[in-house]
Image (cartoon, grey):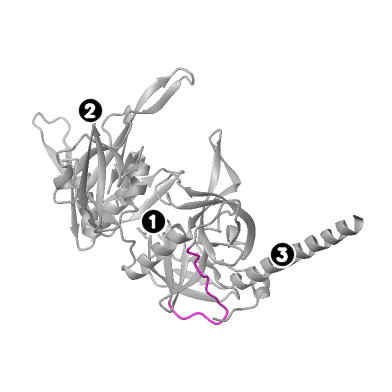
Amino acid sequence: MKTFYIFLFLILGVSFGLNAQNQSDMLEEVMSSVVTVTVEKSEYNNQILGFRGGIDEAYSKALDLGTAHSSGSGFIIMKNDVLYVVTNAHVVESASDEPGSIFVYTIDQSKYEMEIVGGDSFYDIAVLKFIKSPGREVSVLNIRTTEARIGEPVFAIGNPLGEYPYTVSQGIISAKNRMRGGATGKFGFYQTTATVIWGNSGGPLVDINGELLGINSQIAFADDGGDGLWQPQINFALESGLSNRLIDDIINNDGRVQRSFIGIELQQTYISKFDYSSYSNVMVLEDSLPVISAVLRGSPAFKSLNDKIGYMIYSVNNIAIRNMEEALGEFEKVSPGSMMKLGLLKDGQTSEVSFKTQELNPEKNEQFAKHIIESDERITLTEEEGTIFVDIEIPIKGESLQKSEEYRYALLSLGLYEEDSYSALWRISSMGDVGAAIRLSGMYGFFDIILIAYGDEDATPEKLRFNLSDDEDETVIKLWY
């Protein structure tokens, strides 16, 4: 019996050693496909987005990022015989449009200038292209197309805090199809225990075979009396299957993800009510389902839904939905040009409508922009020579007759802005940008416009906040699709 135990121990020990050796071999193969992404020229607001070197080169000396304004991680792939770097959109969104703004550092610390091919702020993904071909030190990461399994071992690789390149952490897939809050990066996440932190953003999550299983994107915080408490065992990576589709769209569709256009506005309302248990006001959801509040004239949904204002939506293509985010998730699955079926509810009676979607483009985002902003009759949007102007009529105080003065402002950026707190401002250069930025912000119940008085050399930027409800005791969140 003693001999058996010793023999079994030796077998297990050899097996463990081989597994550890195999993991190390795999990681050494993968390392040369991982890069550090830096932004060296930035703006205050965001853009609406072979042969390998030896492993020892990755750790031979400290990586000097002294000229970088910010940094993250990324990885190299090949599509159509062209090398690209994939990272998170939030890593490069602040980059200036000027040449020399974005660079990557490879495994031997060679530095290469990059340009943005395109991206998608909603999914927090960006694709970069080399200005000049990289050297023989780099390799390519293969994208896995099969779904991960719960408990499957994974490895996160990146440059945490911008100071520790080629750091590897190990974990497992702990959950799938996670949905996250916030304006961007909402759907299609694996939850993992492979610890990541700031600077890991955009780096690869790989399986035991060294194939890409996800793009490390987010970390979790628990509310600790108003302070965020980091949860290192809860990390999120955009699923590789979804990532692959998005990458193909971006490369083959002029830098944009293909998305359907319906022409619909949905809303849900929260009412402020006093809660005696906490002795404070709390926001209580009034609408049990998303409510159709407007339909754009001439849009795919107009003929079917124009007389359905006030109806609730309970299903999208036979998939039951309970709230705005679930509706958005189902809308995102619908390809342009395909049919969409909506289940409607009004006064206890159900009905269904179907229509064919179109492809979203900048012109349709412009339709959304004018519909939303000009719902306030005092405000007019115009675009002249690449500048968006906001003309605002303000009543003159003390006048017996209703008179007003018109003020002209140049629109600089749009999104969410709180001084000394969270901000997500998107750079505006076209009317289509206005619509895209508003659509990213509507689920918050408000959006902010950063303006500057036109023609005034001494003017400083001003913030104008648009609340989506006129009632201070309620919050209305909206979805435009």
Magenta stretch, main secondary structure, is loop
Q: Residues within 10 Å of mark 3 (few under 14, many from 20)?
A: few
Q: Disc 2 or 1, which lies upstream in sequence? A: 1
Disc 2 residue type (three-letter): Asp
Disc 1 residue type (three-letter): Ser
- Horizontal and vertical percent for residue 455? 22, 55
- Horizontal and vertical percent for residue 216? 52, 57
Residue 347, numbered label? 2
Please name whichever residue, 300 or 169, is drawn nearer the observer in this view of the structure. 300
- Horizontal and vertical percent for residue 83? 46, 76
Which residue: 28% across, 29% down?
471
Residue 121, numbered label? 1
- Magenta-drawn stretch contains 26: no
Q: Give the labeled residue for mark 3.
A: 20
Give the magenta range.
131-145
The quarter of the image holding the N terminus is bottom right
